[in-house]
């Protein structure tokens, strides 16, 4: 079985464009997941773990924002 790389023919979207959209969604999804983990850690009074998840959430938000800026620049507002 041969594997053919998707080049936009099947989806109508070029790989790099799809990848960028996926990246933004993944970052936003992770930021949302981190909120649950932060609440779990706070409920257990584990400030060290809560802080780790806050930092991860901030990184995910930053990644999403950077990705959204690229999307906006490439596809307009």
Image (spheres, rainbow, N blue to C red):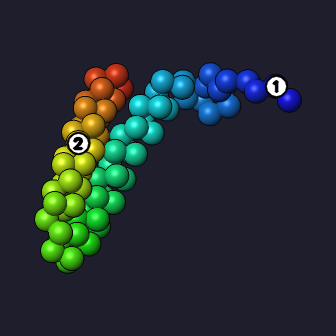
Q: Quadrant of residue 75?
A: top left
Q: Is 28 left, or right, of 1 in this rendering?
A: left
Q: Quadrant of residue 9?
A: top right
- Rounded to the nearest angstrom, the CA distance separating label 1 from label 2 is 38 Å
Specify whether residue 27 is in view. yes
Q: Which residue is mark 1?
A: 2
Q: Secondary structure at mark 2?
A: helix
Q: How many marks?
A: 2
Q: Which mark is residue 59?
A: 2
- Identify the residue shown where x is 20% and y is 53%: 52
Q: Quadrant of the N terminus?
A: top right
Q: Are marks 1 and 2 in contact (CB under 8 Å)?
A: no
Q: Secondary structure at mark 1?
A: loop
Residue 46 spot, x, y in % from top left: 18, 69
Q: Mark 2, residues whose alpha carbon is within 10 Å: few (<14), some, or many (≥20)?
A: some
Q: Nearer the viewer, residue 33 or 16?
A: 33
Residue 12 spot, x, y in % from top left: 60, 29
Q: Quadrant of the C terminus?
A: top left
- Identify the residue shown where x is 54% and y is 24%: 14
Considering only vertical position in the picture, is 18 above or below 52?
Answer: above
Considering only vertical position in the picture, is 61 above or below 42?
Answer: above
Q: Earlier in the sequence, mark 1 or mark 2?
A: 1
Q: Is 21 left, or right, of 66 in this rendering?
A: right
């Amino acid at each position: 079985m041969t594997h053919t790389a998707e080049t936009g023919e099947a989806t109508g979207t070029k790989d790099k464009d799809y990848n960028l959209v996926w990246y933004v969604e993944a970052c936003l999804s992770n930021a949302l997941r981190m909120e649950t983990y932060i609440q779990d850690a706070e409920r257990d009074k584990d400030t060290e773990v809560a802080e780790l998840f806050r930092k991860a959430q901030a990184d995910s938000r930053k990644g999403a924002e950077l990705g959204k800026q690229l999307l906006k620049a490439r596809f307009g507002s």
